Image (spheres, helix red, strand yellow):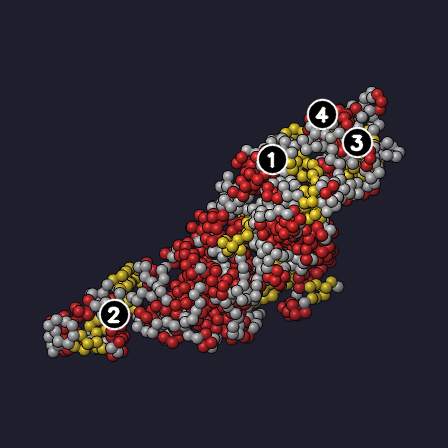
Amino acid sequence: MDDVCEGKDFSFPAQEEKILSWWDEIDAFKTQLERTKHFPEYIFYDGPPFATGLPHYGHILAGTIKDIVTRYQSMTGHHVTRRFGWDCHGLPVEHEIDQKLGIKSREDVIKMGIGNYNEECRGIVQRYVSEWEKTVVRMGRWIDFRNDYKTMDLNFMESVWWVFAQLFQKGLVYRGFKVMPYSTGCKTPLSNFEANSNYKEVPDPEIMVAFPVIDDPDGACFVAWTTTPWTLPSNLALCVNANFVYVKVRNKFNGKVYVVAESRLGELPVEKAKKALPDGAIGGSENSNSKPKASGGKAKNVETYEILDKYTGASLVGKKYVPLFDYFKDYADVAFRVVADDYVTDDSGTGVVHCAPAFGEDDYRVCMEHGIISKGENLVVAVDDDGCFTERIVEFSGRYVKDADKDIIQAVKEKGRLVKSGSFTHNYPFCWRSDTPLIYRAVPSWFVAVEKIKDQLLENNKQTYWVPDFVKEKRFHNWLENARDWAVSRSRFWGTPLPLWISEDGEEIVVMDSIAKLEKLSGAKVTDLHRHKIDHITIPSSRGPEYGVLRRVEDVFDCWFESGSMPYAYIHYPFENVELFENNFPGHFVAEGLDQTRGWFYTLMVLSTALFGKPAFRNLICNGLVLAEDGKKMSKRLKNYPPPAEVINDYGADALRLYIINSPVVRAEPLRFKKDGVYGVVKDVFLPWYNAYRFLVQNAKRLEVEGLAPFKPIDQHILQKSSNVLDQWINSATQSLVHFVRQEMDAYRLYTVVPYLLKFLDNLTNIYVRFNRKRLKGRTGEEDCRTALSTLYYVLLTACKSMAPFTPFFTEVLYHNLRKVSNGSEESIHYCSFPAVEGKRGERIEESVNRMMTIIDLARNIRERHNKPLKAPLKEMVIVHPDADFLDDIAGKLREYVLEELNVKSLVPCNDTLKYATLRAEPDFSVLGKRLGKSMGVVAKAVKAMSTEDILAFEKAGEITIASHVLKLSDIKITREFKPPSNVKAEDMDAKGDGDVLVVLDLRRDESLYEAGVAREIVNRIQKLRKKAALEPTDLVEVFIKSLDEDKTNLQEILESQELYIRDALGSLLLPSALLPPHAVVLAEESFHGISNLSFAITLTRPALVFNSDAIVTLYAGNTKSAHGLQTYLLMRDHHNLKAEFQLGKGKLKINCIEDLPPVDVALGEHVFLTVGDYFSSSKGSL
């Protein structure tokens, strides 16, 4: 393996760029597809975005989810075709062209020519394709841009025709009306997107109108409120809320009787006594022309009106009333009656809403549901394309509706039906092109009869699996439950044309299901299905020439119909790929945002159910919205979010991927995006992961530095038999990681994986690497070192493979280096199979190690509470737990790790949970208070008096009866409080538990532990000095110490008594400064004062040669000059190379290259020592 740099010098973004280049070099994605082509198919549907805008975090999020799932499926033995798709038709494209060309109306398009207009649209469709590709590729997503699909492609459009034709043949298509925002200036309906793009604050009239109730004994009138008087001539019904209470009231001053919602009584005009009005007209209200008072009116109205009766809204349904105008008297049999619906609210108006079905979405729906109008029949729309009344509205014929408001109000007044009038200012939508006020108007449309298949839709929804499931069970289910017939046609230009040819008399309809059929029936050659290429094509009537020809209807498809047809159209089914489709439908996986429950997810489900009686997909991940840090919508104008490119360039794509996946957004909840959060992933996930990997590489390289055989990982099956408890534990924990990731990925729960990985990496670095440093650094022997290194190697390799779908770049970087010591490994980590769970998982050892870490945390907490630093050794700790197996582990194979980590001299296991604790019972007043009432006092007293035996029996039984009341475990709080032994003061011992294990620490000072504490302090200062000198863990140094005290014996005695601990901790001897050679290269030195009442100096040097001068002089027969020449020569040599030559010569080296000196054989340990430590050990050994 190659050397690796420090974490602070590792640039994640730069490494990712290198990997991207390498993937390009080897054509990695294409190679993976080729290698898996014989595997079972995994069908993934990629919802097509518009390429007329730039990708944002919402796209990045959905793309990351899709990439993770498809990479995982590829690694688990599937062939996963991934083709990018583009939504090319529809409003966003037309909108841009209209702005670019200054188009204001439908006539403008006709004038320039539909062909010219459509080609302009085609020209911008792929404006940002390169930017999309750049962002998607930079995020590490593998998807095919070369073999993409576009909704404007001929093949795609032909399949859309086929889908529609199938629905038509099944009787699921009809012509009806849809109420839409309508621009009278442009003479065209608008989408909701367009309707919401230009609001203005304007004044509008608001009036209350009386509708006399037929056959009411009191001559009562329903009072309806409206802000669109121009719709009154088209009134066909009144709507109430069945759940509201309505009142019949009489005006005390003029005798008029009204029916309104009780909660809105205050909105009726306040009257004063007046002279009688002629002809019994309704009028004379005090504020008849002023703005209504929303508050305070009800109190006054108590004086103005007396309540005659009260009704439920439901009881009013079916009552007939006198129409305001007689323009629709031909509807009298079914219209002019009261209906009920929940859309009527009590926050404005009177609780009675007038319905004109041609001019309101809810009006149309309610009138349809109550049989006032019928689906599929011609609806009388008494307003023409210019927004003027038709001839049916005789008195106002030809008048622009908004201009007619005043005259209509006057007509209402003259009829004696005006109860109240005024005006109010509000935000109202205007046409973004013509700047004229919008109206809601019913326009002819072609519908898919969704309501016919609603039961099947609900059943098919049950067959799908969603993450999170509440979106399926609640939001999507409710949407399907309330599904309405779908208007699939649009009166536009740039889209897939409806394949309907209709005769002039409307009696003959031909639906095209293929290009071949159109060519056959028309005799024309068809190469493009857009309007300007086929609108001119006619078909002879099958009834004969006298019936003329059939012409195509002008409409195009709603672009949602196209995207809903994607599972068939992107592979040109049924014209191609029949076997591929039919063997793999429904598709395996889709993923998009929460908004698609009413969009793409819905249209996919409707079309697949209508076509095949099946859902379109099996598994679905639904993500939430990515918001700015302040919780607002991300806005380019407000610049309230960091550009994606900036975040990627600063922290890398992998960090961004993990950040968004490890967030509420993958559970369909909103995410407040914080750039600092991405940095947090680098800091908390990638750097610890990288440091564990770097520690492996450094210590594997150290073997070579020390002249040992290069590192090669030991066979995994042999490692599984390691007797080391931490090897057993990390092997088991790694298998648990693989098991967990497989389990969660198979269940599409991406958001659970990152927290688990975080915990795993934390355990790897803070338990396995930390507690195994001696082994990994070779201080327990070469064999043990290679076992530990091999274990760490396989753990990192397995973790990389498990996380490759999530972090494709970082895992590739690590894998590139790790594979160099493994024969027969794959070229890329993304060609590897996903790890399988191998070997037996040791659940007991995993649980014991987890508890060990809990014990360490609890003990540290006790130390902190009593200001006892870890450097101060403690005499004893007691571990209290009832599980004998765990106590065996903690007092046996895990004991040394606990004692060393906590600097405690002995560990005592205890399975008597009451030896160090008292039990106390307290009633849970919040639970029992209401239930027991007056008995609470008696029961509380008895609970508090429960003995330890009583409490233990209660815990075992799960219930207890007190004063005839049965109390469960949830009714009584059991607390365990620490109880020190009777012979120990409270301040000398403390404990802490977590509800499972209890840790007891003896805090009494023990002079016998003083020397161990000093030794720990010295080691701590040496390690800090190493860091200060910027030394790597693998850098070999020699450490010298010098006492700065007058009495040097104290330090000397401590160093002698603690020699083993210090040598173990440092990995080398701590040497007396008197042995520091004059030629040694000093790396760092520092003096320390007042450390446990001692002062000393520490010096760090490179390893330095020590010569046995007498022995060298003897080599040269007493010639001191020659002996000095040899020493000079050896000091000039590279220490590492010199060591290697001595090892090669088995401790001997022939020196025959010094000019004028005879050749000599130099022996290690006799003539020269490679380090002062070697010399010191040799000297001590000879004493």
Secondary structure at badge 1 equals helix
Residue 1040 position within the rendered picture, expressed as x and y whole percent measured from the top left: 27, 66
Q: Which residue is mark 4?
A: 406
Q: Which label is found at residue 613? A: none
Q: Amino acid at mark 4?
A: Lys
C-alpha span from label 2 to label 4: 104 Å
Depth check: 445 or 1155 in front?
445
C-alpha span from label 4 to label 3: 19 Å
Q: Which residue is mark 3?
A: 327
Q: Which residue is mark 2?
A: 1137
Q: Nearer the viewer, mark 4 or mark 3?
A: 3
Q: Nearer the viewer, mark 1 or mark 2?
A: 1
In the visual, does 471 lie left or right of 1096? right
Q: Tag 1 or tag 3, which sits nearer the N-term?
A: 1
Quarter where residue 950 is shown: bottom right
In the visual, does 1020 lie left or right of 223? left
Q: Are marks 2 and 3 in contact (CB under 8 Å)?
A: no
C-alpha span from label 1 to label 2: 87 Å
C-alpha span from label 2 to label 3: 109 Å
Residue 1121 position within the rendered picture, expressed as x and y whole percent measured from the top left: 11, 71
Q: Amino acid at mark 2?
A: Asn
Q: Are marks 4 and 3 in contact (CB under 8 Å)?
A: no
Q: Which residue is mark 1?
A: 110
